[in-house]
Amino acid sequence: MIRQFLTLGGVILGLVLGGSLGYVLIERWPFFDALYMTVITLTTVGFGEIRPLSPAGRAFTIGIVGSGVLTVTYGVSSLVRLFSEGKLGEYWRRQEVRRMLKTIKGHFIICGCGVVGAPQSSPPDCGPGHCP
C-alpha cells in the first residue's frame, strides 16, 4: 500500500520534471516558466499559456494533460479503494503488531493441544478432548 503511493508520488514528480524539461527543449523556455506551465497544466487550473505555444508545444501540452488526468484518476481510485476496502485499518494494525514484536525479547511461543494445536502436535492421540 505504501509502495503504491510512493510509486504514484514518483510518477507525479516524473511528470512535473519531464513536462518542464519538455517545455525547455521544445519551446526553449527558461526552466521556471516551463515548471510553472507544467504545474498549471497538470493541475488543470486553466490560467492559459504563459507564452505562445508552437504546434509541437501544443501537442506536448495535450500529452501532459492526458497523463495528468490519468495519474490523478488512478490516485483518487486508489484512495477510494483504500478506504472502502478497509485496508487502511488493516495496515495500521499490522504496523502496531510489528512495532510490538520488535520490543519483545526472551519470549517463547508454545503451541498447545486442542483445536489449534492438534495439527501441529506430534502425539497421534492429541486433539480436542484428548489432551493430557
Image: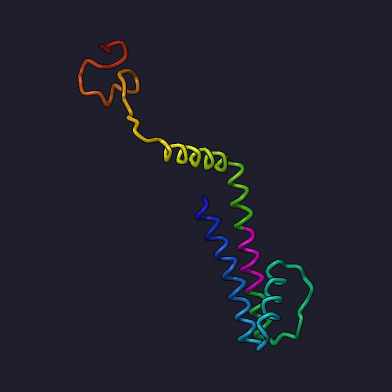
Q: In screen coordinates, is 125 left or right of 18? A: left
Find out whether residue 65 is within the magenta segment.
yes
**Relative to residue 126, is residue 93 depicted above or below?**
below
* Foreground pick, 85 / 37: 37
Percent of width and height locating residue 40: 72, 71
Q: How many marks?
A: 0
Percent of width and height locating residue 114: 32, 18
For residue 59, which quarter of the picture? bottom right
Task: Give me the residue at 70% from left, 87% from top.
Answer: 54
Q: Which range of residues does the magenta coloring cover? A: 64-73
**Relative to residue 99, is residue 13 depicted above or below?**
below
Magenta segment main secondary structure: helix
For residue 38, which quarter of the picture? bottom right
Find out whether residue 87 is within the magenta segment.
no
Task: Give me the residue at 65% from left, 64% from top.
Answer: 69
Q: Identify the coloring.
A: rainbow
Residue occupying the far left of the picture: 123
Percent of width and height locating residue 131: 28, 13
* Foreground pick, 132 / 124: 132
Residue occupying the far front of the picture: 106
For residue 121, which quarter of the picture? top left
Residue occupying the far right of the picture: 47
**Relative to residue 26, is residue 81 depicted above or below?**
above
Task: Give me the residue at 56% from left, 70% from top.
Answer: 14
Q: Quadrant of the C terminus?
A: top left
Task: Give me the residue at 20% from left, 19% from top.
Answer: 123
**Relative to residue 18, is residue 111 depicted above or below?**
above
Q: In screen coordinates, is 49 left or right of 21? A: right
